[in-house]
Every structure is written in C-alpha cells, then in structure tokens.
Amino acid sequence: MKRIVTGFVLVILAVAVLLDIQPLSAADNDFLIYFENSTLTLKSQTLDRTVYLPLQEIVRHLGLASTDATGASTFTIQGQNSRLVLTPGSGFISYNDQPILLQNPIRRDGGQWLVPLDFLSQGLSRVAGVEFRYKPGTRRVFAGKVMTTELAMNAQSLGALTRLTLRAGSPIDVELQKETAQHRAVLVLKSRAIDPARERLDYKDALVQSVTFDDSDGMPRLLISMADDVRDVRLTSSDGNRVYFVDFVREIASEATPPTTPAPLAAAAPARPNANANAPAGAGVRVIVIDAGHGGIENGAANSGTLEKDLTLLLARRLRTTLQSRLSATIVLTRDSDIDLTSEARAGVANNNQASLFVSLHTGYSPDKTASGSSIYVMKPDFTGGLSEPAGGRMFLPWYMAFRTNAAASQALAENLQKNLNQALPGWKFPIRFGPMGVLASATMPAIALEVGNLNNDANAKMLAEPEFQAKLTATIAEAIEQFAGGGRKQ
Amino acid sequence: MSSRMPRHLKIGLIVLVAGFAITLGLFVDVIGRIQTMVHEKEPAGNPFTPPAVPLYERNDPPMNVKVFFPGMKDDVILSAEDQTIRRSGELANRARQILQKVLEGPKSAALYPSIPKDTKLQEVFIDDMGMAYVDFSSTISANHPGGMVNEQATVYSIVNSLTYNLPEIRQVKILVGGAEKETLAGHCLLLPLGMDLSITDIAPPKEQVNHAD
C-alpha cells in the first residue's frame, strides 16, 4: 500500500516537473508590424516566454541611423535630437542618458540584436516619433497613423445552416474562396491592416469546426474549417459592406435562390415598408423571430386554469410549424419552454439572430367580462423614455430607442396583419394601438405585438383553447407575414 | 431489551432520527417560504412609518380634477371622471391626493378600477425638472391581471391623471416596491412617461400644450 502511494506521488511530481519545463527558445514565427504605408514581416523568437524581435531590421525599415559598437558592446539608435543606447543582457536602456527599465532584457545573439516587445513602445517610439500599438497575445503591431479596420465575428447555428457574422469597423471587401473538397473556406479580407477582436472564434458545431484569423504573410484572411456535411457556403454583405454573413449550408441551394444572388438581408427589409407590393422575385426574409409572451413565474393573464403563458407558447409553436411549411426562412422562438425572459432579452433574441421580422404573441385581459379585446401593438412612435432630444440629433441612442429605425415598416406590418385578421375572423376586431411596449422597444427590425381575445371573457377563453381556432389564427398570421415578406416562398 | 441492542445499531438509530428531524425542519421551512412567495401579502403596517401628515389644510380651496380610469370603447382605452381635491400648498401633496383618487377607483359604473386593490401609494417625489417619481407597493405589479391594453390603461391612468391636472409635472416615473422595474406586468415599460391623450376621449387641458412623451 505504501509503495503504491509513493509511486503515485512520484508520478505526479514527474508530470508537474515536465509541465513546468518549457523550451526556452521556440521556433521562429512570423510577426507583422503595420506601418502607415508598408508592412514589415519579421521572424520573431520566443525566448524565456517573451517574444523578441530582430532590432536591426526594424531600424533599417524606419530609416534610422544606428551604430553597432562591437567593442563597447552597445547598440545606439540616433533620432533627430535623441539617442537610444542598448546594452545586451540588461533591461535598462538609456534614452538621452536617462535610464528606462524594460520588463525583459535586451539580448544579443551572434551579430543579431533582439528586443522584447515593450521596447517598441518604451524605447523605439521616443527616437522614431512613432507610436506602437500592441494587443497581448497577437502577432501584430500597429505603428503610427496606420488605419486599422476592427473586425468582430460571431457564429450561431440556425438549424439547417450555421451563420458566421463579420462586422468591420469600416467598409471592406471580402472574397470567398470555397475549397469544399478540402472542407475549407477562405475569406480574403481586402483591407491592409485588420485588427481582429479575437484571433480565433471559440465556436464549433455540426457544420463549422473552427474559424481562425491569419495575416502571417501580410494578407489578412479567415480560415474556416468545415464539417463533411457542408454542401455550400454563401456570402452576403450588408450595411454598406460593413457586415458580412457567411452561411454554411447542409444542402445545396435550390435554383430559386442561387448562392450568387442571395436574398436581401434583414437590413434591407425596413427600407422597404411596402415589401408586399411589387417585391422582386426571390426577395424575402431570412429569419423570423416569434415571441411567446410571458413564461416561468410570469403567468400573464389567466382564466380558471388557462394561463396566457401556455396559450402563447402553443400559438408560437403552431405559428412556427405553419411558417416553416410556407417559407424558406428560419423561424426562431424566443422561448420554447416555460421560462421567464425580460422584454429586453426577447427583443435580444431577434436582434442577435439578425431577424427580418419580430412578432410577439399575447392574449388579452379586459376588466369588462363581455369585451373581446384584441389589439395589434406597434411601439409608440414618440416614445423617448424621458430623454429630451437635442436639436442636432443624438449620436448614441439607448437600446430602447432601437424601434425608431423601423417605425414605418412596423406599422405597415401591423396594417397588413389587421387586414388579414379582420377578413379571416369575422366578428373579431383588431385595432392597431401604440404603446410603450417593452418587447418592441429594443427590436431593430419591423416588430409588432399581437394580443388576441380577452381571457376575462369565458367565451373568448374557450375559443382560444380550441385547436381549430388556433390553426385558423396562426394560418392568418403566417399569411400576413408571407405577404409582408413578399416572396421567399418554399419551392 | 433495549440494553441488549448492539451499540452501533443504537448510534445508527440516533443519527437516523436526528437526520430525519433536520430534513423535516428544512422541508417545512422551504414550504413556508414558497407559500409566502406565492401569496404575496402586503407587510403589516410598518412600525417605523412616521405619523401621517395631512395632505391639505382645512382652509385650502377645492380644485376640480379629471381622474383617468379604464373604459374601453374601440380606440379609447381611458376615460376620465371629474372629482374634487383640495389645492394644497405643496405640489407633491396635490399629486398624492390625485393618486389617492386613482387608487380608490371610479364612482361611475361605466368605468373600471385601474390599480389592483390593496395597492398602496408609498412615496411621491417631484424633482426640479418636473419629473414625478411615484412609488407603489409591489401588489400593483404582482396582482395585476395582465393584458397589454389593460396594462397600458393602468400606467396611463396614473401618468395622465397627474400630468393633466398638474402642469408642473411633465413626466412620471413609476416605481414598484421602492425599486425600478422594467415593465409593470410584462408589457408596459416603466421609463419616464409623458401625458398621452390619444388613447383617451378627453381634449387637452386649455392652459397647457400637449407634451411629447
């Protein structure tokens, strides 16, 4: 027994020692310095867990005068009115005879001088008059006035496809190179200096294995490794080439929506409030988000055991099924179980999925037992939430003002739904109302809330629970959405 | 008999009984907590509440006000009822009297109460910018029957009753149980709101223009 314990302890110690010993010098790696008009590719070395860059190459590229005094064992860089002196093995550098301490020492390897990264910002920037910006963990430095384009990316699974969304700080051109046979896709980003928020995306699903940013040869691009199931990759741009959607699809797109002419995007829908009239063939919506009102501890309105939260979930699921059979769009529910969400979170589901349409489902309650109060709600157009607007407009808007971008389209959607519901359900009235509704305030797409019936009215409550009525109601809503979407019908 | 019981069995039995008692105690406690959560009750009178200060003096003149209540007819969500309060010197006290009328409910049978009963007005504070902070007990939200129109009616019966009668109040921020809440009962945002007469059958008051929200 004692021997087993001793052996076990020894094994653990051995593993710990092995983990601790890392190679002091790693292989050379490409490192990039982006200057205003040029890019310098360097071979960096990792010594003692610190990245070192060859100094002479940088000094030469900057066109600075330097002296490598082998006898005195110093390296001197001459600026216009300044002088920087380096000594090997020391973290102290001398700038105009003032000492500056670096976190890591200067090294000299044969005839090559190696400087740690903080030398660029602490020392070199003073003599060269150029600022250096470096994000730890990356392999690139931006120098001086170089214009960088920030790049953020995220991915999400939308059922039959996985969507990678790229957001660039300024408009860029992107070229898609499909290498489906090698299960790879390359997105060439046609901008000189890209500053990605992350080097790789921590995302993996059945279609996308990995997304990595690579600019090691000075050509920024995204390398995407895909699963065998991916049959097609589609690239669509939006927002004046600031936003790109890359869809990885299980099946090859049908003839109606060839990948070269992708359907207009979410952002295009609001610009066309009357999309139902004269919509071009193939125009349509990509994602529709349906919100089942209330949930969890929020029961909503109730009538002897019939809870609003259950009815709305039932209706939302029915509507999803109906829409899926009619449209090629992806239908997302804000909740598919009995959970409570804040209004902001509900609108967030629509925003995060780049939805083109957002419909929130509710049942009503009126203190009048005989009323059958249904309504279609659009966000109150003059709602400011207490903010007074300056004359020149506001540069930053709070999220609850997002509805303003699509106010007209939301109303058009409401009118279309009203027309359809009034026709399909004679005797029912669906007035359009405006109110400060939380679920609609922060939606960045045409958004409405539909409130059906009055749960305080027993006849209404009974009817709402009938499957035939539910089927008719959801079919009518689906019809209105389809008309509004103007195409995109399933082949 | 018991003296012959082996010692380890005795200890085991004692531990078992003690464990059972602790579990039972916890169970009863949890059930009790859940019940208090489900049946939300107004806490009994706060012993530290300062003595009630009268909202008006005896010689304050009467003041006619319109108090808004739900009365649903097609596009009209709210209607108003004429009531009388005293024109007290302090603005907040006039606001308190109006809100008291809203809490009491309508006199006419054609209109409905807008606020769940047992709800209390906890505090009213009006700042220099004309923003009235109105704090109700949490029953206003927990016991609200729901419905989008109905909730809009509740919120605007408070907002309109204050802003219509007291032009000094430009916006109303409703607090629930002393804290901010996103929505009253899952629909209406409780951000500062201005008067909205478009949902009522009442014409704008003569002495003031309709404020934007």
Image (tube, coloured by chain):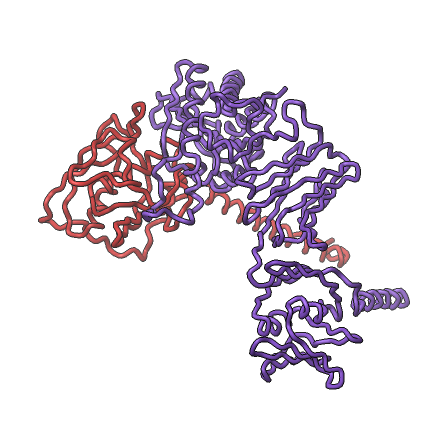
Chain colours: A purple, B red
Please report the residue visible at 29 percent of the width from the left and 55 percent of the height from the top. Answer: B49
Q: Nearer the viewer, residue A481 or A376?
A: A481
Looking at the picture, does residue A464 appear above or below residue B54? above
Picture coordinates of residue A484, whole percent (x, y): 49, 24
Q: Quadrant of residue B69?
A: top left
Q: Nearer the viewer, residue B206 or A391?
A: A391
Picture coordinates of residue A434, whole percent (x, y): 36, 32
Please report the residue visible at 67 percent of the width from the left and 53 percent of the height from the top. Answer: A199
Looking at the picture, does residue B156 appear above or below residue A465? below
| Quadrant, the C terminus of chain B | top left
Q: Nearer the viewer, residue A98 or B116?
A: A98
On the rendered structure, is A131 left or right of B132?
right
Q: Quadrant of residue A21?
A: bottom right
> Is residue A481 among the parts visible in the rendering?
yes
On the rendered structure, is A163 left or right of B35?
right
Picture coordinates of residue A429, whole percent (x, y): 38, 19
Q: Nearer the viewer, residue B62 or A221?
A: A221
Picture coordinates of residue A14, whole percent (x, y): 85, 67
